[in-house]
Amino acid sequence: MNNRKYVTRLILIILLTNIPAALTLPMFFKVALGWMLGSFASSANLLWLAYNVRVSLVIAPTKSKLSIMKGTYLRLLFLLVYSILILSIIKPNLISFGFGLLAGQIVIYLYEFVSRNLSREN
């Protein structure tokens, strides 16, 4: 599987987790909103990371180090500013927002665990 299909599949899984959050929005507004806002940021972070990797593979090795550093710090700065703005203006549940931000990592681990266990059975 190529990088684009892999990232698309992970983003789809992350965004599908917003369906239960949207269904529970009337009952648990701050918790569901926190998860949804965090998972959207996690999806954007994963897309940006995949873009940075794709760009750094096609440029010269000397320029790729600088490109990777700039891309990483810019991506993390965006997440920091986004998180500060969301937490100060909208004020969702902090714990669910944090887990939403971790959705990308959680999905990657679970996807790899399931796909490797399924490949062992075949």
Image: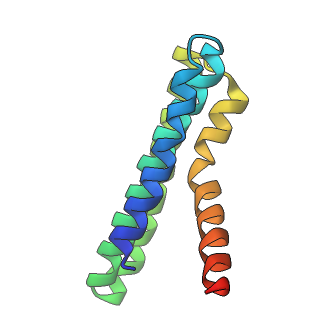
Nearer to us in this view, 56 or 1: 1
Task: Identify the residue at image location x=48%, y=34%.
Answer: 82
- Above or below residue 11? Residue 109 is below
Q: In the rendering, at what x and y percent does residue 26 appear?
A: 57, 11
Q: In the rendering, at what x and y percent does residue 13 appear?
A: 49, 51
For the N terminus, the quadrant is bottom left
Q: Quadrant of residue 93?
A: top right
- Above or below residue 19? Residue 109 is below
Q: In the rendering, at what x and y percent does residue 114 appear?
A: 64, 69
Nearer to us in this view, 16 or 103: 16
Report the side of 49 relative to 24 (left or right). left
Task: Identify the residue at image location x=37%, y=60%.
Answer: 8
Nearer to us in this view, 41 or 108: 108
- Above or below residue 30? Residue 11 is below
For the C terminus, the quadrant is bottom right
- Above or below residue 82? Residue 68 is below
Farthest top residue? 26
Task: Identify the residue at image location x=48%, y=43%.
Answer: 16
> From where the camera sits, is residue 83 visible?
no
Q: In the rendering, at what x and y percent does residue 40 appear?
A: 46, 39
> From where the camera sits, is residue 113 visible?
yes
Q: Quadrant of residue 78?
A: top left
